[in-house]
Amino acid sequence: MEALQLGSVQMLAPSMAKFGPMGVREFELFDLPFMFPNSTVLHRVMDGEVGSKLFAKLDTKGVTGLAFWDNGFKQMSSNRAMRTVADFKGLKMRIQSSKVLESQMKTLGAIPQVMAFSEVYSALQQGVVDGTENPVSNFYTQKMNEVQKHTTISNHGYLGYAVVTNKKFWDGLPADIRSALTAAMKEATAFERDIAQKENDEALEKVRAAKTTEIYVLPESERAAWRKALLPVHTEFEGVIGKDLIQSVDDAAAQWEKEQHSGKKKK
């Protein structure tokens, strides 16, 4: 991120959690548990007013935001079955460096451990940590299924990236080049999101076929209990992220829900 700000590199796609330490903590919106009910609402938020507001915050840091890219929704894994909130008590859970994720794990009764992604497999293997949270594609490609007996399909959180560029470099490009790159980025974003979804779907089937990890799909009733237990995390970070941004996402989710009901009635 420093190299980008200095102009040593022109473009990056860091995970959202990297913007908090840079001083733009509004991006921690994406770390909040159960913030987005599905990818439709998520993409509406990213591609709409909320996404624009977040990218505007980067301008003062010498960074221009171009697009939001998916990895996917996160699932919990450990060597203990995780069906209720009580099942997390005392588990050492690896997280990305994020105050929100730290609070999420503590609220569940787990012990958060910040650790580099490259170290997670060996830490799980050696019992340094008990579990972690990841989209299934990460879980499978890093072979975590070999060292984790249980995974819960919870879709409780989200992991994504922001494609960003050095502002001075971007502003210095001729207008026609910028216009062509913006159009190309829009196409690339649709393509990337499609690939991310496919990779997660395929990875889940591969984990299932490997039979090393028991897969538990969280039913709606238990999901609601998890969500209720984790709502205090939203309240805790209202002052940091912005109550208005959190409300905008809630409004987008309510609008989607309304559309579903009206669609069912029409049928």
Image (cartoon, helix red, strand yellow):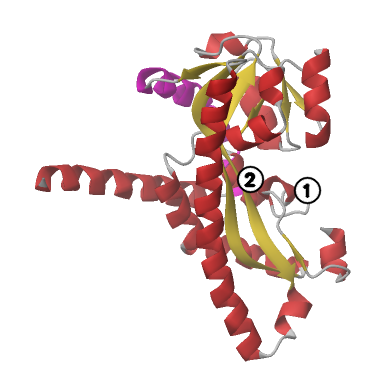
Q: Amino acid at mark 2?
A: Glu
- Residue 87 relative to residue 166: left or right: left
Q: Secondary structure at mark 2?
A: helix
Residue 72 against residue 119 in the figure, above or below? below
Picture residue at 82% right of the left edge, 65% below the top: 4
**33 part of magenta stretch:** no
Task: Of the two numbered discs 2 and 1 on the same chain, state the one appearing first in sequence.
Answer: 1
Picture residue at 62% right of the left edge, 21% below the top: 77
Given residues 88 and 148, the one toward you in this image is 148
**Residue tagged 2:** 28
Q: Quadrant of residue 28?
A: top right
Instruction: Looking at this view, name the residue that lies furthest to the left.
Output: 266
Residue 20, image x, y percentages: 72, 48
Numbered range of the magenta stretch: 220-241
Residue 160, image x, y percentages: 61, 48
Residue 34 against residue 39 in the figure, above or below? above
Which of the numbered marks, if any, corresponds to residue 151?
none
